Amino acid sequence: MSEGPGLGLLPARVTDFRRIAVLGPGVLGGSVALAVGKRHPDCSVILWGRNPERVAEIRATGFECVTDDLSLAVHDAELVILAVPVGALKRLGRRVLEAGLAGGACITDVGSVKVHPHESLGKDMKDRSVSFIGSHPMAGSERTGFEAADADLFVGAPCILTNENEQPEDEVQRLMGFWTGLGARSAVMSASEHDRLVARISHLPHILSSVCALVALENPKDGRFAGQGLRDTSRIAAGDPAMWLEILVENRHQITKPLREGASILNRLADFLATGDEEAILRVLEEGQARRQTLDGIE
């Protein structure tokens, strides 16, 4: 992994992009639009949603720069951010090209899987003189929709960029500067390295959170007596199941190995408990504690 200059939070800077279109009014897309408005008030940002009723609801919250007209959103954009589920990226990316996006623009996404978007979108973009560089801000919420959007969501959050289609380094730095300006810490790596990494640090934890909720709340009424530990451990299981299905299926080849590793540890722990092997049980708990403590030293 090659680390960009934003790894370790840099001071906010003025972005080089002056006209920004954010496509998808969910929690990530909405947060990008709000963050640009807060941190770069001189920039023009427009939020696009495909549902006119939803667009009207967002406008009613006081956010005026929102439309359901894709051509209007992208026609003079310098940066287009695809903030839609991974299953919709290819279709929306092609619609953006057909909607009159100017050559020289940069398109990025905020998806949790990167190999497939580069394979499905990268060549189309390059043929149209448009840059495609992947982005994955490691921020979000189990809540969904524009109502959960937060202008400070990206402050201190890691953001991984992928440049599988070999765009010029200055374009990568330009996009990195955009995320740094929103408060994120940036790094660059290959799409395959990204997908392997997030399978362990993001996708596996979501699966385990769901399993925890399934097992612990086999009888939902037991939840009346649950403390904060269960709430913390199962929190991300509250995320949108349909969205997570797309992510897990898209990255299934990378998730299978760590998932089997986790299952193996659980099976061994069950055996240790069955035989009363306290020393082995303690080793598992101590190693887990030690690895968790490494997170506390990361800035």
Image (cartoon, helix red, strand yellow):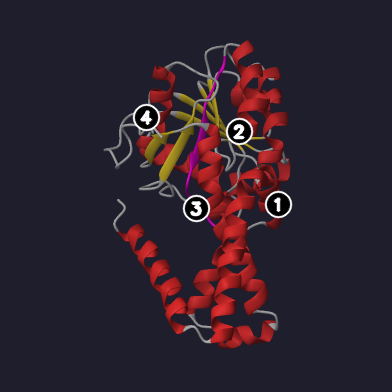
The numbered dot on residue 201 is 3
The span picked out in magenta is 130-141
Q: Are marks 4 and 1 in contact (CB under 8 Å)?
A: no
Amino acid type at circle 2 is Val
- Residue 181 in the image, given as x and y percentages of width and height: 36, 35
Q: Nearer the viewer, residue 233 or 157?
A: 233
**Disc 4/disc 3 C-alpha distance (Å):** 25 Å
- Which numbered disc, 4 or 2, marks the residue that appears first in the sequence? 2
- Residue 126 in the image, given as x and y percentages of width and height: 60, 14
In the rendered image, which residue does mark 4 sit on? 177
Residue 122 found in image quarter: top right
- Which numbered disc, 1 or 3, marks the residue that appears first in the sequence? 3
In the rendered image, which residue does mark 1 sit on? 245
- Vertically, is 254 above or below 275? above
Rate crowding at label 3 as few (under 14), some (14 to 19) or many (20 or more) other CA atoms within 10 Å.
few
- Which numbered disc, 3 or 2, marks the residue that appears first in the sequence? 2
**Disc 1/disc 3 C-alpha distance (Å):** 17 Å
Where disc 1 sits, the SS reads helix
Q: Nearer the viewer, residue 198 or 65?
A: 198
Residue 62 appears in the figure: no
- Tell me the residue at 71%/18% (across/down): 98
Rate crowding at label 1 as few (under 14), some (14 to 19) or many (20 or more) other CA atoms within 10 Å.
few
- Residue 64 in the image, given as x and y percentages of width and height: 55, 39
Q: Are marks 1 and 3 in contact (CB under 8 Å)?
A: no
- Tell me the residue at 33%/36% (across/down): 6
The numbered dot on residue 115 is 2
